[in-house]
Image (cartoon, rainbow, N blue to C red):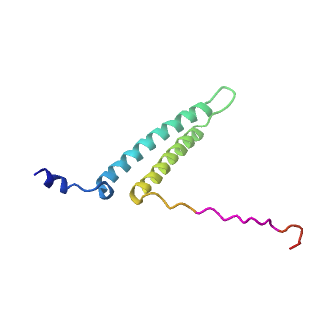
Amino acid sequence: MAEEKTSGIVPPKYDVNAKWDTCIDLTVRRFAYSSLAGAFTGLLFFHSTPDSSGSPATRWASVAFGAGVGIGSAYTDCSRIFNGSPAKLASPKISGTPAPQGGQE
């Protein structure tokens, strides 16, 4: 009876529901934390003092930038979760002979 229950379990590689749960959780957390980090950075760097005018637009821009960074990093990780790790780029081949200089070949 115990073997019947374990035979119906989907391997983690093919469990799409678990992948979606992981990606949604990852996206929400990264969006929230990076937006808060952007808000804190905006308040820290773009605060208004009597001699300068801290525009609310610049503070909102820092929040939007933080949110974009969070969503972008979550998108990258989710694409790795669904498609596996991306292919490694091959490094360029470097020849041992020096390049010709001064028009001489």
The residue drawn where x is 50% and y is 62% is: 87
The residue drawn where x is 80% and y is 65% is: 98
Could you tell me residue 54's position as x and y percent? 62, 34
The C terminus appears in which quarter of the rendering?
bottom right
Between residues 12 and 50, which one lies in front from this camera angle?
12
Could you tell me residue 38's position as x and y percent? 53, 38
Residue 103 location, quadrant:
bottom right
Look at the image and say whether residue 98 sits in the magenta stretch. yes
Look at the image and say whether residue 27 sits in the magenta stretch. no
45 above or below 24? Answer: above
Q: What residue occupies the far left of the structure in this picture?
A: 1
Please provide the residue range marked out in magenta.
Answer: 90-99
Q: What residue occupies the far front of the structure in this picture?
A: 96
Residue 61 location, quadrant:
top right
Could you tell me residue 21's position as x and y percent? 32, 49
The residue drawn where x is 34% and y is 53% is: 19
Between residues 24 and 84, which one lies in front from this camera angle?
84
Between residues 26 and 52, which one lies in front from this camera angle?
26
